[in-house]
Image: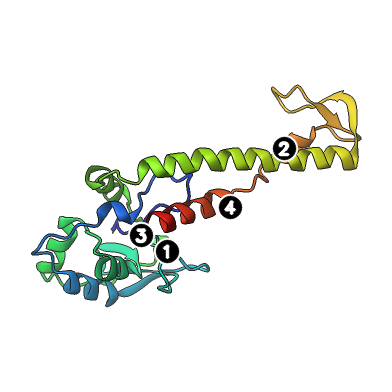
Amino acid sequence: MQLIGYWIRSLQDTDYFPPQEFVHQPADFPRDAVADYLRDADVYEIYRGTSWCRFVCKHEMGNRELTDGFWVWPEDLGHYVRDHCVMLPSEFVQHIRANIPRIPAPPPALQQVDNTFWKMWCRQNSDGSYQPRILRAKVQAEREVEEITAMRARKKESDEGVSTVRCQWIGCGNFALRRRALCARCCLRGQEPREVFYFGLQAVLRHAT
């Protein structure tokens, strides 16, 4: 089955695009019919967390994936189509117009969903208008993450003390923390404040709209 309708998740996401770059519906685009089709489908998968509208509007998004047995999409994809005039692939629209009977989809554990088509279509049809903004915000977010991590490392050194033994992390030349094998920075690896990239994206999309 083919996956469609997924959008950029954070400033670090290089797989997907903001839906703002696809706001273009030809005069013959059946907006309501497509939105209704997207809404009236079977549940394919349920997730714990809910999504958020990339236009940063007040619409409450869901936490499920829907399917017609051929395509899989997030349950509120119709919101983007109906309320924000986002375009979808012609292949999907033609599938709807062909009135092909829906088929029951096997459980997710028994079915592989392919996102190759969607990512390729987005690359080929994006107008690219938001990429410079996202790049600038990413650079700024990386600076903020570095500043926060450096501050946390300094506090850790102050709290625990620094030894005269070199950090054992390969390629690191810092001194290890007292009674530890690693320095403060290496102890904090994997704990960087990645939420900065998430909220940074929201700020970009909110400001731009």
Who's the residue at 40% across and 68% down the image?
57
Who's the residue at 52% across and 53% down the image?
198
Judging from the image, what secondary structure is the residue with disc 2 in? helix
For marks 4 and 2, the one nearer the N-term is 2
Give the residue number, with chain letter if any, for mark 2. 150
Please indicate whether residue 179 sits to the left or right of residue 7 in the image.
Answer: right
For marks 2 and 3, the one nearer the N-term is 3
How far across and down, in percent of the image, does residue 197 sit? 53, 48
Q: Nearer the viewer, residue 5 or 127?
A: 127
Label ID, residue 111: 3
Label ID, residue 56: 1
Residue 184 seen by the camera: yes
Q: CA distance from mark 4 to mark 2?
A: 16 Å
Q: Amino acid at mark 3?
A: Gln
Judging from the image, what secondary structure is the residue with disc 1 in? loop
Q: Residues within 10 Å of mark 1 (few under 14, many from 20)?
A: some
Give the residue number, with chain letter if any, for mark 4. 195
Q: CA distance from mark 2 to mark 3?
A: 44 Å
Q: Amino acid at mark 2?
A: Ala
Q: Amino acid at mark 1?
A: Val
How far across and down, in percent of the image, does residue 138 sit? 49, 41
